[in-house]
Amino acid sequence: MKKIFFLVVFALITSFSNAQMLSTDATISLLTVSPGAELYSTFGHSAIRIRDPRQGLDFTFNYGAFDFRTKGFYIKFLRGTLPYQISGNYFENDVAGWSQENRSVIEQVLNLSQAQKQGVYDFLQNNYLPQNREYAYKFFYDNCSTRLRDVLRRVCKDSLQLSKTLHADSSYRQWIDLYARKNEKLWADFGMDLAIGEPSDEITGANGAMFLPDNLMDAFDAAKINRDGKWQPLVLSKQLINRDMLAVADKEKESITPNILFWTLFLLVLGFTAYQFKTESKSFLFDKILFTIAGVFGWFIFLLWFFTDHGVTENNLNIIWTYPLLFPIALLLKKENNRAWLSKHFLAYGIILVFFLAAWKFFPQEINYALIPVVLMLCVRAFFVWWRIRKKLSSF
């Protein structure tokens, strides 16, 4: 769904951009592209196909393109202010590209009247004009799938009836988790869970669930359209159109998952802490590194929350355990340190982490379970730092 489509200016576009009328042989189809191996394609993609054999027209429109040449591209991308665009391509070129990535393409030919076909075509062409091409992309609310849902609604109005109950009971985060795990992207799922906040835990309802291409395809399968006073299925036909171009491939599993890595690290840290406790080690090197890393992540979450426009990164409760002020406070840890306030600081932080773990299931935001050993690790070391400094203070 987040595949980068390069903007291509085709001579074909300019040749039929002046209010061309579709013939009665024209068809409008929804194309649903399956998830791919790359991270950007984890959630699939949706496109609209305009086909008119009488006029030699076979073209696809895709929302979600952006231009690498945009001034300040990387800063705007990170801040969520990068302008996205609608792009166009020859149908055969798009299908060849998706097939090369071994992604299936399912076509649903839509049961639209001639006026509705023309309406969809005119809307997309108008949207493709340079002055209308850009829009503010939002992963959940305004992406390649939701845009196509809204185009059909705008054109068909009350004659289109979409289900109000289909896929209505899950949150945006739960849908992301499902797709990431199904496509063996556990690290991507972990990273997204860390970055997105409480808005992601809102229940999508049937309308919001269509932010995923597969759900939009299901919604169109279940939809009805009023033709000549009679409610009929929206989808006339449905088929996999690139079966012969696909190879049989197994999804490559991630051998080291977040759970495996972090639980292993926790056990190692637990053993290391027991060793330091027994030998009364005075070294804080490990803690300086650990708490600095946690603090840096805290600042990252803080910046996503307050200084970006993604729409889903605010109110992120992960900021509790990352706690931005760990960096630079962690840098003050030294062997000869005997500051009472530093001891109390890590004691308070450790207690907060205990309560954080106890309240895990009661938060309005779902926290990735792979973070449990991470929080435990920080908790153990926070209490160790408190004990080490307190013991040094008591020796004076």
Image: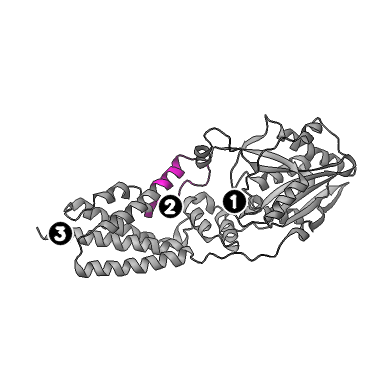
- Residue under label 1, please give it: 40
Residue at figure coordinates x 18%, y 51% from the top left: 339
Q: Nearer the viewer, mark 2 or mark 1?
A: 1
Per the rendering, the mark at residue 84 is: none
C-beta proximity under 8 Å, tags 2 and 1: no
Q: Quadrant of residue 15?
A: top right
Question: Residue 317's mark?
Answer: 2
Secondary structure type for disc 1: helix
Judged left or right of residue 173, residue 291 is left
**The C terminus appears in which quarter of the rendering?**
bottom left
Q: CA distance from mark 3 to mark 1?
A: 52 Å
Depth check, front residue: 272 or 115:
272
Instruction: Indicate the position of residue 81 as horizontal and vertical percent values.
Output: 54, 37
Q: Is residue 3 shown above or below 175?
A: above
Q: Closer to the observer: label 3 or label 2?
A: 3
- Name the kind of residue labelled 2 in the image: Leu
What label does residue 392 carry, if any?
Answer: 3
Residue at 63% from the left image edge and 48% from the top image edge = 3
Tell me what residue is drawn at x 41 percent, y 67 percent: 263
Number of other residues with Cα within 10 Å of mark 2, as a class: few under 14, some 14 to 19, many 20 or more: many
Magenta residues span 299-321
Is residue 309 a member of the stretch shown in magenta? yes
SS of the residue under disc 3: helix
Work out whether residue 239 or residue 353 is closer to the camera in this orientation and state it: 239
Q: Looking at this view, is 119 or 283 the one in front? A: 283
Q: Earlier in the sequence, mark 2 or mark 1?
A: 1
Q: What amino acid does circle 3 point to?
A: Lys
Residue type at mark 1? Tyr
Give the Cα separation between the discs numbered 2 and 1.
26 Å
Mark 3 or 1: in front is 1
Residue 53, image x, y percentages: 88, 44
